[in-house]
Each structure stands twice: as C-alpha cells, then as structure tokens.
Image: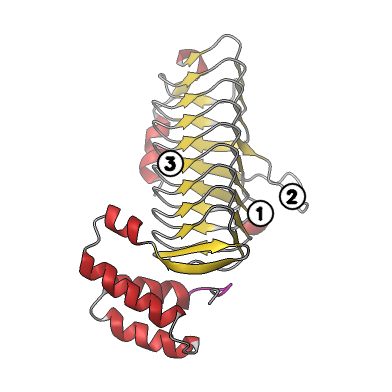
Amino acid sequence: MYGAQDRRLKGMTRVAHARIHPAAIVDAGATLAPDVEIGAFAQIGAGVEIGAGTRIGSHAVIEGATRIGRDNVIAHFACVGVAPQDRKYAGEPTRLEIGDRNIIREYATISRGTEQGGGVTRLGHDNCIMAYAHIAHDCELANHVTVANGASLAGHVWIDDYAILGGFSLVHQFCRFGTLSFSGMGSAINQDVPPYVLVAGHPAHPRGINSTGLRRHGYSSPQVILLRRAYRTLYRSGLPLHEAMCRLRAMAAEAPEVGAMVDFISGSTRGIRR
C-alpha cells in the first residue's frame, strides 16, 4: 500500500525549501516536500517525512518516525506521531504511517505503534479524523474512514473501508470494524462489528443494516434486501451462531456481500454481540 509513497518520498527535499512560518520549529532531521505548508508555532520533529501538498496548521505537533503522504491536512493543535500511551512502552523505535488526502482536525491525537503490536500505527487514504478524536497505538485504518468528534480508539483496533464511528464512540482494544459498518453517537464497542452493520448503545448492540451508507455507495435495492435477510438470519432468527453461519454461507452463493460478512465473522477473535 505504501510502496508508491516510499518512491515519492525519495524525491523530497530538506526543510529549507518548504513554506514554513518563521515561528514554526522544524528539526533539521525532518524531510519535507518543497510545497509543504507549516503554520506558526507548529513543531516538526526529527525523522518526520511529509509529502507534497500537505498542510500543517499552527501549533500542531508531529513527532517520531512519522511518514505522511501527499495532500493531507493536519489542523491546528493536532498531535501526530506521539509516543504510545502504553505503560509497557520503553522508548523502542516505532512509527506512524499516513497515506494521502487525509484530514486530521483540531486536537486529534494519533500515537505511534508499539513493539508488541508490530511497531506501526497506519492510516490509509482519504480518511477524516475529526476534532478531539484519539487513535491509539497499533491501530489500522483503511481508506475513506470517518472518525467523528471525540471518538476514541484503544490500541490494536482495525477499521475497514468506509466505516463511520459516530461522535464520542469508544472502541475497546483489538476490536475490528468491517466495511461500511457504523457506530451511533456515544456507543461503547467491546466486540467486532461486521461489515454493513449499524451498532449503538452502551454497550453497543446491533440495530440493523447501514442501508443509508450502502445506497450512498451504489449498492442496489436487491443487494440491500439480501443484506437485510442476512442480518435477520444472524441477529433475529434465534439460531445458534454456527447454524446462522451455515445459512449465511448458502446465501453467499448469490451475494458476495454476504460472503464478506461470513469471512469477517469467521476471522473474529473478539466475537460479535448478538
């Protein structure tokens, strides 16, 4: 995923050529593309690499071995690439990798990885991390993910494409969110959320299929109907999980989307709330 980005970073220049406010503090060991913009009082540490077209707001802090791709926007007072909030962390070299066209808003915090978790926190492309959101160590966000204001991800959380976390959602460590899943405002999630499923509550319970999100992304009415049938089989039929999964596998023969739910649940380590 980051191979092309790695090649682009080789063509970048040192900080003297970027558009840096005189009041910004940029370590000589940072590497910036020529058109990077850095606002007043921002701090950019050694080992940071920032790709073309990226804009850093005033008072933002970017630390550690952090690689940021092209055309990102990191707003005022955001803290990116900071040390993980893990009592076991003892200064080991870990990193943060951010792809292209991400928006990271005011006061959001994103930690580097830990040695125990593989050493890297990773964001893909076109994600929106809203104000005061927190992404902890060793999390992985795919592409087009939205993390709304005040939502918090504990360590090792995995979020797939187009998932949306509502404002002030709380996600327990090692949880996974499938494609186009959705958590309502203020939800507390302590188990995996399968693709296309909407959860809400404290603790979060399944509330239905994310039909609005499905239609926005081009799913047809027959596809949505099939996914609703799959949802009812999984959550409303009263069947034991292994029997519900057998029925879903049969449905997957005519609906690859249902197959995605089956694969996700089969690979779950935390299980799903039913």
Q: Which residue is mark 3?
A: 99
Q: Is residue 266 magenta?
A: no
Q: Is residue 154 left or right of residue 182?
A: right
Residue 47 lies, with reference to residue 21, above or below; the image says below
> Crowdedness of circle 3 by 10 Å Cα count: few (<14), some, many (20+)?
many
95 relative position to 14: left or right: right
Residue placed most toward the observer, 119 or 131: 131
Residue at the disc numbered 2? 89
- Measured Cα–Cα span from mark 1 to mark 2: 8 Å
Say if the magenta span includes residue 268.
yes
In this view, 64 is above or below 168: above
Q: Residue at x 59, y 48 (%)?
A: 168
Q: Residue 97, position in %: x, y?
A: 51, 43
For the residue marked with disc 2, what is the amino acid?
Tyr
Which stretch appears magenta? 267-271
- Give the number of marks: 3
| Crowd class of label 2 (few under 14; some 14 to 19; many from 20; radius 10 Å) | some
Q: Position of residue 24 (x, y in %)?
A: 60, 15
Residue type, label 3: Gly
Is label 1 in a helix, a strand or a loop?
A: helix
Residue sitting at 41 percent across and 84 percent down? 245
* Nearest to viewer (mark 3 / mark 1): 3
Say whether marks 3 and 1 touch (CB < 8 Å): no
Q: Name the secondary structure under disc 2.
A: loop
Which residue is at 21% across, 70% downward? 222
Amino acid type, mark 1: Glu
Tell me, yes or no, if residue 194 can be seen here: no
Distance CA(mark 3)–CA(mark 1): 21 Å
Disc 3, SS: loop
Residue bearing mark 1: 115
Q: Judge whether residue 40 can be spotted in this image.
A: yes
